Image: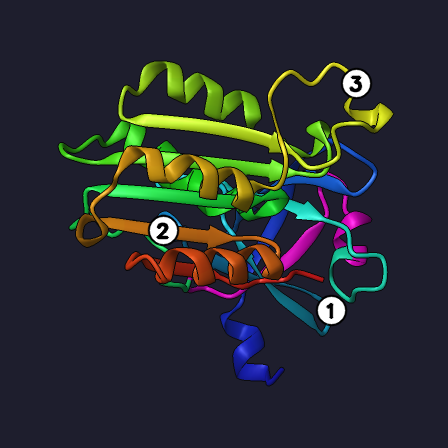
Amino acid sequence: MTTGQAAQLLVAEVTYRKDYTEDIFVLRLKTNHPYAFKAGQYCTLGIGEVERAYSIVSAPDEKEIELIIELVHNGEMTPLMHKLKVGDKMSCRPRAKGIFTLDEKLKNHVMLATVTGVAPYISILRYYNTHPKEGHNFYVFYGGSYADELVYHKEFSDMAMKMPNLKYFATISRPTEERNKGWNGYKGRVNVLADLTVPSWQLDAKTTMFYACGHPGMIENVKEKFKARGYQVKEERFWKE
């Protein structure tokens, strides 16, 4: 990183941290200058010489950057982030990037996420919920191996109660394990659930966008199956480590 680049970086201070599992945690960051972004975009954060991009959970009109992070034990960045506590600081590049945003020209939006891949959808729907427009339908499929990995399950459930144009489906792929005892929702992989459910809605391919964010295998499966049926597919491929 050059001196010029370093001078342009923002300082992002951790104001909040909550751990949901041993490996999954949520951070909120406050930057030393205003940080503008579109719902669905990502920020680039750094600790020392290591930088990585992370999709933003917050809506653009929130005052802080919210992130959901999964520790990758042999990674470079997430082990450093896992050590952060309130008051610690990171660097943040001044411009958000990414085109994984809502295509408002289309009517139907089918969103699939695994674990931390849910971040851009929370941002999009938080913003849409406070800046509603006419003529959009949302179908959210949120999956993980374990129920406690579905950090935003309650928020999505609450949104679905208030938004008649939002259908929400949460699923776990290891229902027989003790850690998932008491789960009463759907069971199976998120892409399989979508493959079984979406056709019954008979969504017009010309007015429908599929979004896939999370595990690369899930993304490839969604592209293979739904592109073959004529649907458009957007993907976000940050496999964060």
Q: Is residue 114 left or right of residue 232?
A: right
Identified at 49% across, 71% down, the residue is 8
Residue type at the position of mark 2? Phe
Q: Along the polypeptide, which appears first: circle 1 or circle 2?
A: 1
Give the distance between the C-alpha atoms of the residues marked 2 and 3, in whole angstroms.
31 Å
Give the residue pinned by disc 3: 181
Give the residue pinned by disc 2: 210
Q: Nearer the viewer, mark 1 or mark 2?
A: 2
Magenta highlight range = 79-96
Q: Secondary structure under badge 2?
A: strand
- Residue 221 position, x and y percent, is 53, 58
Identified at 40% across, 63% down, the residue is 98
Give the residue pinned by disc 1: 48
Q: Secondary structure under badge 1?
A: loop
Q: Is residue 212 left or right of residue 178?
A: left
Q: Nearer the viewer, mark 3 or mark 1?
A: 3
Identified at 53% across, 79% down, the residue is 5
Give the distance between the C-alpha atoms of the residues marked 3 and 1, in whole angstroms.
41 Å
